[in-house]
Image: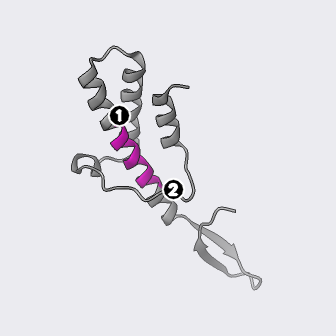
Amino acid sequence: MSHYAALLEETTQFAYGARPMTKPPPDLSALTFEAAMKELEAIVRGLEAGTAELDKAITDYQRGTALKEHCLAKLNEAKLKVEQIQVKSDGTLSKKPFTAE
């Protein structure tokens, strides 16, 4: 697996306990997860093709890294919003934060 494919795979996996994310560049903060993944996939395909000049490849790689961080941050945000619904012994429902078991 190429380094670029590994970058994409790491982004698509939901890793528990992921490290804190750095603040994304302003142009990334408005991107949805789906839009960022689509752009990242396009960058990965272009880098794997190996046809770009060195300066463009470096710029694309840097953008891809920022997109990866943005996607991981979005996944962590989603993880925090997920809750588990529990049925108590008396039959009532309650919510608790999601935890990996």
Q: Secondary structure at mark 1?
A: helix
Residue 99 figure quarter = bottom right
Which residue is the extreme one toward the top? 51
Give the x, y percent position of residue 60.
Answer: 30, 30
Report how many numbered discs are placed on residues in the image.
2
Look at 64% across and 71% down and name the residue there: 85
Relative to residue 50, is residue 17 depicted above or below?
Answer: below
Label 2 or label 1, whichever lies nearer to me, is 2
Quadrant assignment, res 101: bottom right
Q: Residue lying farthest right? A: 89
The stretch drawn in magenta includes residue 5: no
- Magenta-colored segment: predominant secondary structure: helix
Residue in the picture at 37% in, 27% down? 42
List x then y, in percent, for residue 56.
25, 24
Type of residue at label 2? Ala
In primary-sequence order, the first of circles 2 and 1 is 2
Q: What percent of the width, then of the height, locates residue 11?
A: 48, 42
Per the rendered image, the range of residues in magenta is: 64-75
Type of the residue with mark 1: Glu
Name the secondary structure under disc 2.
loop
Image location (x, y in percent) of residue 91: 73, 81
Dot 1 crowding, Cα within 10 Å, few <14, some 14–19, many 20+:
some
Query: Residue under circle 1?
Result: 39
Q: Quadrant of the N terminus?
A: top right
Q: Which residue is mark 2?
A: 18
Q: Which mark is residue 70?
A: none
- Determine the residue positioned at 62% across, 68% down: 84
Decide if residue 86 is on the left or right side of residue 31: right
User: Measuring 51% from the left and 33% from the top, which residue is drawn there?
Assistant: 6
